[in-house]
Image (tube, helix red, strand yellow):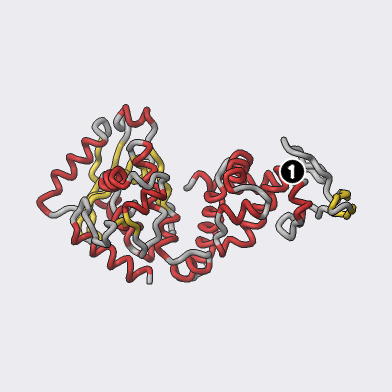
Amino acid sequence: MHWAAIRWPLLMLRLKTKPNGWFPTTGKSVPCGALFLCPLSGFFNHCKIRSKNRVGGFCSAWHIAFMTDYERIARVIRYIEEHRETQPNLETLARIVGLSASHFHRLFSGWAGITPKDFLQCLTLSDARRRLQEGKSVLDAALDSGLSGPGRLHDLCVNLEAATPGEIKTGGKGWIIQAGIAESPFGNCLIAESPRGICHLSFFQPLEVSSHWKKLESRWPHAELVKDDMRAHELCSMIFKPDFRAQEPLKAYVKGTAFQVKVWRALLEIPEGKLLSYGQLAARVGNSKASRAVGTAVGQNPIGFLIPCHRVIRETGAVGGYAWGTERKRAILVWENETSG
């Protein structure tokens, strides 16, 4: 389960348990329903602040000016709950409380303990799961939840966790990593799962299986590798078959530099059926001139398909290289285009 999925219900409880009237905060404290005298063009106009039960509704410029931190957070959370189908972005959320995007992001993250994006994703995923349990198809559940399609719902279910420096140093010491071979729509693949999540997925030809096992062992030299084809088959079904999507959150666990992890997280944000060039991906990670470094990080992705490095192409529009073969990359892109359409 995504850690934020545990955090946001606690956040909602925190909002509901604030005392009536005054909101203790580091900012200005204003009683609900207070009456203010506001100067405007030499005249005084009355501006009544609405009660906290209306934080999701209309909010005047004067109300925004006197909002406490708590009122801002409460209003945004109410807005996200009521408009999650439209997937409001950071700028929209910041605007309704009169803050810049960066200021609002710091405020929300510091107060709530999760980012606005994480909070929205948790609500969206929870809503999609409810619709699936009601019997709706994966396509309908995704669209009704405000997503572009089943692929986006699938990507939303992938939680990428990075190895800590200590875990990198120990190389998986004391861990049991289950690894096995399964048949995917794109040929045989080797899938490995650590106690922290899926840590390896690679495609291979029949004569290449030995080299793939050795590569997995080299990444986690001190872990105990246990062959488990049955678990690999289960994971393969969750990853590739549409009927299994969004039924269980998938954790991807990677070991890499801070820059590599940043690139791999950016890959997860590319919707199914969409493509980015290496330059566009570099811009997304905050350095438009780092196309070559981004390309190297993409090529070192240890979890094929689940972290969709296949959705990155050359600036010319050519499909470009792929760690597991250009033909396989083309096949995946065609398959995703059909399933997302």
Residue at image point 21% right, 35% down: 218
Residue 311 seen by the camera: yes
Residue flagged by tag 1: what amino acid is it?
A: Thr
Asked whether, in this view, residue 293 is left or right of residue 70, the answer is: left
Q: Is residue 191 left or right of residue 153?
A: left
Looking at the picture, tell me which residue is in the foreground, 261 or 43. Answer: 43
In depth, the one of 60 and 109 nearer the eye is 60
The residue beneath circle 1 is: 68
Q: Residue furthest front?
A: 41
Q: Is residue 270 left or right of residue 39?
A: left
SS label for mark 1: loop
Q: Is residue 257 above or below residue 232?
A: above
Task: Look at the picture and state if 75 lies above or below 225.
Answer: below
- Please identify the quarter of the rendering in which residue 57 is found: bottom right
Q: Position of residue 295 (x, y in %)?
A: 28, 47
Query: The C terminus lies in which quarter of the figure?
Result: bottom left
The image position of residue 35, as x and y in percent, is: 88, 50
Quick check: 29 above or below 116? above
